[in-house]
Amino acid sequence: MAYLSPSPSNPPLDSIRTIVVSINDYILSVISNPEEWILLKQKCITILSIEEENTLFEFSSEHSALSSLYWGIESIEASSIQPEYSEEKMSRLRNSERMLQMPALLDEQGTTTSGVPNTILVAFSYFYLSIVSYLQGDSLQTTLHFLQSVLVSPDIVRTDIAPELCESIFFTCGGVYKSDDEIREIARKYKYRATYYQVMSYGDSNEKPLRKPNKYGQEVFAAIGHSVAEKLELSETCELLQYQNLHSVDMQEDEINDIFNRINASRKVEDSPCLDRYLQEDYNHEIREDNGTDTLANIFHVSKQQAHKEANKTYNKDTLANGSQSFIGTFNRSIFDIQAQQSKTTWNTQTEDVSSLKQLELEEMSLFGHKGCKTFEGMRKNLQTKKRGNGLETQSRRARRMDLWKNLQYLIKGLLGNADEKYVSEVTMIYQMLNGKQGVKYSMLKDVILDQLLTAISSSEEKTVIKASMTALTKIISVNTTALEEIKRKGLNLSHLANALKQNVQEAAILIYLIKPSPTEIKSLELLPALVDVVASTSSSSSCYTLTRPSHSLLTPPAASLMIIEVLITAFDHATNTMHLAAISSPSVLCGLLDVAKSGNSGEFISLASILVKCMQFDGLNRKYIYQYTRVAPFAHLLQSENREEVFIALQFLHEVLKIPRSSAIKILQQIKKEGSFDIKDTLLQCIKQFHGDHKLYAADILLQLNAMDSPPDSKKFRNEATRALLDAVTYNEDSKMQILSTFILSNIGGTYSWSGEPYTSAWLMKRGGLTSMSHMNMIRNINWSDECLQDQGIDGWCCKIARRISETGKATFCGLQEGLKSKNKSVSKACLIAIAWLSIEISKGPNSLKYSACEVLLDEIALFLHPGLELEERLLACICIYNFSSGKGIHKLINFSEGVRESLRRLSDVTWMADELHKATYYLFSKSDQRISCVHTQTIEMHQSGSGAVTALIYHKGLLFSGYSDGSVKVWNVNEKLSTLLWSIKEHKSAVTCFSLSETGESVLSGSADKTIRIWQIVKGKLECTEVIKTKESIRKLEVFGNMIFVITKGHKMKLLDESRISQSIFKGKGVKSMVTSQGKIYIGCTDSSIQELILATKREKEIRAPTRSWRIQNKPINSVVVYKDMLYSSSTHVEMSNIKDLRRNYDPQMSITAEKGSSIVAMGVVEDFIYLNRSSSANTLQVWLRRTQQKVGRLSTGSKITSLLTANDIIFCGTEAGVIKGWIPL
């Protein structure tokens, strides 16, 4: 069989004739050879998994499709035994055709029927339809059905149905195989030509229902004659123009008119009621007598009555079945054409305001009369009414120009009326051709095209018209970038585009993006919901794009929408960006965004990844949702791109998505290794070597984590290069941002994060090191101590694994971290301290040489972080490092510690067991006489906010200092060494705030007030909010919380218990209660009769542990304060007593007593490791300092006014005064 060339150089008539002959010859060979017929049928049955022994299909839509195909094939076989030309044979063929059309109409895009891909089912259906058409004597319809089968699945036709025929039609003479897309393109061209040929031949052929096989090729072409060949040649000319490089074409007016005429001629089908419905024009070629300017409605008007009449014509069913030459019948057999028909509607609209059309004031405007003629019709009338005195040549030139306007009018009318891709392509082609020409008339034509499209957008209320106009403009811009400037110059109104987008005209998103409005303009249009809808509605069905950021020619509505959303969440101030992020931070919206990643539209990943990064940084719920429903492999594949922008956003996304709890992060790393079709570690290594700045560090972070997944590591080069990149940024980089990022990565790469993306490595280390007291935990910022990520069992194993790999790099790593510890940037030094802390866990298990090397380089710098005045977090981390470095034989390293370091360890001994162990070790290594206690207190902080009255309550919560005032306000301070900053000031209490208390989980603060309310406060997304108000019957003096129970001391010295339902009940009835403290599941209560009561919270059992004074001579002295410190109970009235809590079970026997001054009582008391602080009634402006162990008075602190509140925290003593001042001192 001769090979056919699909090249347009072949004469079109011969090419179509050869295709028809080849396909019909093949069909004849199949039905003429029983063995080949049975073999093909068996292939079909096998592929479709149909069991011939059991052809009783279930009664369902899916089995109905398989059944129709099977019995359609059987009906073809049954017709073969009938006499030729018999009615029975024709009936069976029609029956077979109806059954085969049912599976042929299935949706072939990505769906299955009974487990069989629809593409296979539809391809076989069309192939057997081509056999039916052949037996009915319709050679052209046979060709069309076969070509449609190829369009549906080139692979099935090429390999299973007709391999030899496909080789002859679609492959080159050299046997070079073409791709499926190339085969589809060739088949599509042949089908279009054959369809046109079939339409042109309607009514001209007098073929019999069945013709002899050896005659069909010659008869069908001979019957049509010369005129059809000429029409086909015109169609071929039009088609070639659409694929040519039109910028190089140089045509005159006659040639332009010729193109228009050929386009129009190719669409005309005489006496075809179907096409009449779409092509008829209410166009009067005679000059009308009215002098007014015609509107667009007059030009583009289509008779509704005529359209209705044509649309409702009925056709005989037998004609549809038998008339193989019928245009309607032909397209009823094609899914492609049925879908096309669904989009065809007539457009009838009236535009009253034509003032927006640009007046054509160009050089040759005189040819068209006065300036008021803005429409095609006005131009035509003025042209025809011109004075006839310039001779035949002038009249001929004017007639040609008139044809230009008429043809352009018809073309745009077809575009707006049908919204057909064919019209869009032709308008684009004409504009592209005109754009390559110079001259006034060409500029006028271009202006008219753009003006008409812009007017349709601004004036029409028809969605299809607006969509067609925008599609045309988008296509024009995609091939003519200069048109964008023309459109901007003409003033395309953004509000019109915004309205169209809100009406789900998705092409508007492309135009908005191309116009490049300012971020402020985009914000004012309120497009965010509509943009999200575009992404969500098209992501699942959009086609694949390239791995590059979309250019104008590749831009799609979802890609444009994503890039506009990216602007809305990044281009404004923090508050506005946050507002926009909040609008898209919901599961429903994120689901639509994440569908883009699932669909594989890689061209959209750049903006999508940027949006997802911002969403993760905004809210922890977003981060968790993105982790659960996003495949990271497509983003990892962007690392292979040659475009650096794509690689950068991929690195940032992977770095951000790994900032989650460790076990979840490990799963992502496993997913990257499993799904990656390339060696990602080599790629990341190249990124480290080639990039600078943040992206180099992102690559090092990801590579180091992936390398830790290998057991044993496959290569040390990845570990060494990644570690060196991070340490070099700490040691040699003068850019503080680079230092901060590199140390941030180092501090948390061996630990974990919360779902909000907050680093929790430090919290995990402190909890592991024995931090249990909620009051101490609440001195550390940004930690939710009840977060499940701190109970993650995968952290320990991961920490040891990655610490082992990094510590193997030896002294270089320790030296780099030492430089970070010396940094003046507090965040850098703290991050290095965290990194050393988790590295020390594995170092303590390693060889002594490694431990000694670390101690030699790092220990002296670490000891500096133990000193009072630094944050509690830093002191505890330093304690963890020292404990791990000094374990085992390293204990002798403690001998070199200074007295100040040993004193710091003693003060921390109540906070963690590690500090207590180190304190005991130093205690035994040195004699007791060497234990130094510094009694000198230095004021380090002073805070003042006038106008709020006295400071009546103080407490620490999440590392922030809360203060309550007598005017009912609550203020929150950020205290950082010697600096303090007021963060929030909220006044919701109507009277003085009298006390604070922490919830048992530490997630909220309770404030009691004289206004008879308790308010519960929480820090939510960086803001302090009151989440609950509890009303009571009396003013509140003191609060304590245990579980869901709230214990209250009222102004009348009564004690109340509020349960979970906030129902109040009295406890210790008959007792006047002055003070209380909770410890180890018990409440110790100081009473006004000098007694001390105990309440066991689990059983609510009341017990008196200190009896009241019962002498009539001695006045009862109330217990003003009770404090528990290191299993010791301290109480104060006129003097201070200390008792061991364990001994209270037997009897109350004070082990220590501090006598008060005569005539005064102790109003407030604070107890720390070395000191007891007392505020006496006789000297309300001063605070006495006593040594706790020796009960010696060593000094006093003056506040300047009456002390109204007291708080001890992290070796600091805070005093709130009547003047509204808060002062803090540290013993140094």
Image (cartoon, rainbow, N blue to C red):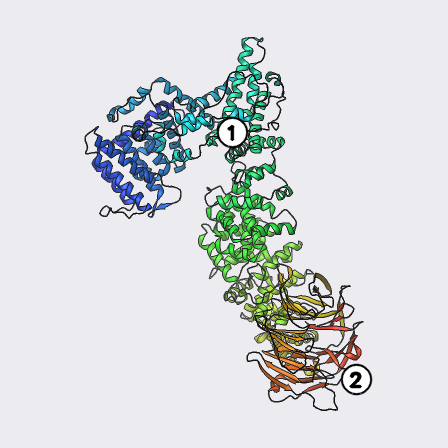
- The image shows residue 303 at horizontal and vertical percentages of 47, 26
Q: Give the left or right position of residue 1055, taking residue 82 as reference.
A: right
Q: Quadrant of the rendered structure where residue 29 is?
A: top left
What amino acid type should be assigned to the residue bearing mark 2? Gly
How crowded pointer 2 is (Cα within 10 Å; few <14, some 14-19, many 20+) is rated as: few
The answer to whether residue 171 is seen in the rendering is no
In this picture, is 602 found above or below 172?
below
Q: Give the left or right position of residue 589, taking residue 894 as reference.
A: left
Q: Earlier in the sequence, mark 2 or mark 1?
A: 1
Residue wearing tag 2: 1159
Q: Are marks 2 and 1 in contact (CB under 8 Å)?
A: no
Q: Secondary structure at mark 2?
A: loop
Tell which of 282 and 234 is nearer to you: 282
- The image shows residue 647 at horizontal and vertical percentages of 54, 47
Name the outermost residue toward the right.
Answer: 1200
Discs 2/1, front: 2
In this picture, is 397 found above or below 667?
above
Residue wearing tag 1: 428
* Residue lying at 54% horizontally and 10% vertically, measured from the top left: 393
Q: Quadrant of the rendered structure where residue 619 is?
A: bottom right
* Residue lying at 59% horizontally and 11% vertically, measured from the top left: 387
The answer to whether residue 996 is seen in the rendering is yes
Tell which of 139 and 908 is nearer to you: 139
